[in-house]
Amino acid sequence: MNLPNKITIFRVILIPVFLVVLYLDCIPGNKWIALGIFIVASLSDMVDGKLARKYGMVTDFGKFADPLADKLLVCSALIALIEFDRIPAWIVIIIIAREFIISGFRLVAADNGIVIAAGWWGKVKTAVTMVMICFLIGNLGEDIASFTKYIHIFEQVLIYLSLFLTVMSLIDYLIKNKDVIKTYK
């Protein structure tokens, strides 16, 4: 197993660690530790992809496991944040639904020998969503009382920006790849 694939597996292993730490209020500073774990896991997604492409270590396992690990990390964090009342469930449902739709679309494309790369909208959506999750995990409004109102407004802007980018990236993806459906029999 090559290094990029090991990094992907490491990211998957970090997911339950992240969740346990996030939920354990008995650990002093648990949300900050959880945030650190989430950031390391998020950055590992970028690292394994760059290594795989740069050194020609792209594998079928990596093509499957890397996006799966990314989706598991993001979906796990978003679902946990619903329970902490940091984000509305309906927004999380839309974000997760988009991931299922795109994954299904990629499976159809792969079945027809077509590889669909991530587009600009999807990359920006991912970056904004990761930043949003970091802010929601950190819950700065809880710690900085004098700025609570402004922090809450900023978090809401991030949530709705992430939602907007989620929808736009889905629309862009479907429009650019509409021929994939036509070729599926």
Image (cartoon, rainbow, N blue to C red):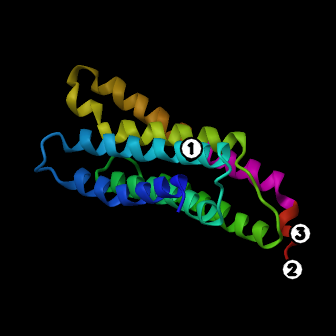
Label 1, secondary structure: give it. Answer: helix
Measured from the top left, where is residue 153 in percent x and y?
40, 29
Q: Residue at x 62, y 49 (%)?
A: 52
Q: Can residue 164 be seen at all in this image of the molecule? A: no
Q: CA distance from mark 1 to mark 3?
A: 28 Å
Q: Which residue is mark 1?
A: 126
Q: Which residue is mark 2?
A: 185
Q: Which residue is mark 3?
A: 182
Viewer-proximal residue among 158 and 38: 38
Q: CA distance from mark 2 to mark 3?
A: 8 Å
Q: Main secondary structure of the magenta part?
A: helix
- Disc 2 crowd rating (10 Å Cα; few below 14, some 14-19, many 20+) is few
Q: Amino acid at mark 1?
A: Thr
Q: Residue at x 49, y 52 (%)?
A: 91
Viewer-proximal residue among 47 and 92: 47
Q: Residue at x 67, y 60 (%)?
A: 102
Measured from the top left, where is residue 56 in percent x and y?
68, 50
Q: Which residues are magenta?
A: 164-178
Q: On the rendered structure, is 78 left or right of 170?
A: left
Q: Can residue 94 be seen at all in this image of the molecule? A: yes
Viewer-proximal residue among 132 and 17: 17
